[in-house]
Image (cartoon, coloured by chain):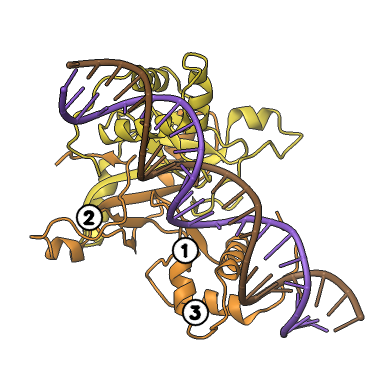
Chain colours: A yellow, B orange, C brown, D purple
Amino acid sequence: MNEGKIHRNSKQRTSILELLKHTKAHPTAQEIFDALREDFPHLSLGTVYRNLNILVEQDQIRKLQYGSTFDRFDGNAVPHYHFICESCGRVYDLDIGPFRELQNAATEQCDHTVLSHKIDFFGICTDCREKDSIHEGTSTSPVGEAVTLEKN
Amino acid sequence: MNEGKIHRNSKQRTSILELLKHTKAHPTAQEIFDALREDFPHLSLGTVYRNLNILVEQDQIRKLQYGSTFDRFDGNAVPHYHFICESCGRVYDLDIGPFRELQNAATEQCDHTVLSHKIDFFGICTDCREKDSIHEGTSTSPVGEAVTLEKN
DNA sequence: TTGGATGCAAACTATTTGCAAGTGC
DNA sequence: GCACTTGCAAATAGTTTGCATCCAA
């Protein structure tokens, strides 16, 4: 895309980065937009998306995708794994790993050049577990495709 | 959604499932549509999506999402990990794991109830590595958000 | 015969893009 | 002043949905 472009500073982009660096919430583009609207009443969603893409490209933030219809963004550029609550859709950082052995295992098993990996854990977060007599939370459609080790 | 619905047989759904069971290619909805068009000249994309969702719901197939704009589908319902080529976008099955220790590690570190996990490995597939003097393949935009253990 | 399944087209949603005006360097 | 950025609105792309008709049980 616009890989080699020289980027100017902009209050908008700086604010987006700041917001992401100071939250653990992994917000969506829309959430970032809503939050920054207070400071920039004329802010547009297009600008938010444009800047998020620039920041991702610069490796300052990360784009998270695991099954909802929309992406989330992570201001923590340091490699780490995630836990995704299948009830409320929230994303939590995990403080384990990285497990380089996994990559060795993968490399040994296939002939491809393995450069990186990503692990997502799924389940029910403490928050949802507590308010659990109601069982089904206001969920943003959970995920499929995960390795269930203990099927119940 | 339509969880408890009783589903009739349909040639279309059967064919979609057959196709997915007999390929290792993890095709997209569009690719499935194109392939089945030969047998069902009047097939519609809507039908393909509807049936894919039913099959996912029935745990007969899995929906894969790792960063492209579109989803892929996996006829292998047995838990397994994937390797995604960052150059050509192809998805390969890996024959390692599942690593239940990971889940224990995660459970210990957070208080959430961890039910499942998923691992994706990223890199360059053998195919792309070979035709590599040309370097940039016809890529469908690679992924972000992965743990790079050895930055080169 | 009844309610799910299909084809078709229109609707939706998240994201991207074109353009004229604004702005950092 | 040049080129990047912005806001706005229109455009995309992938997926979903409404509806009349079709078809499996």
Residue at 41 percent across and 54 percent down: it is B98
Looking at numbered disc 1 in the image, what kind of residue is underneath it?
Phe
Q: Residue at x 53, y 65 (%)?
A: B61
| Residue at the spot 26% in from the left edge and 60% down from the top edge | B88
Reading the image, the residue beneath label 1 is B73
Q: Residues within 10 Å of mark 2 (few under 14, many from 20)?
A: some
Residue B36: which numbered mark, if any? 3
Locate residue B54: give its quadrant.
bottom right
Pointer 1 chain: B
Residue A121 location in percent, x, y?
A: 47, 41
Spatial CA span between label 3 and label 1: 15 Å
Q: Which mark is residue A2?
A: none
Say which residue label 2 marks.
A107
The Cα–Cα distance between marks 2 and 1, rounded to whole angstroms, is 24 Å
Please give the count of numbered marks on the rendered protein.
3
x then y, percent, for residue B27: 42, 67
From this viewpoint, which residue is outermost toward the top? Answer: A39
Question: In the rendered structure, which amino acid carries the disc numbered 3?
Answer: Leu
Are the residues at dot 3 and dot 1 in contact (C-beta closer than 8 Å)?
no
Q: CA distance from mark 3 to mark 2?
A: 35 Å
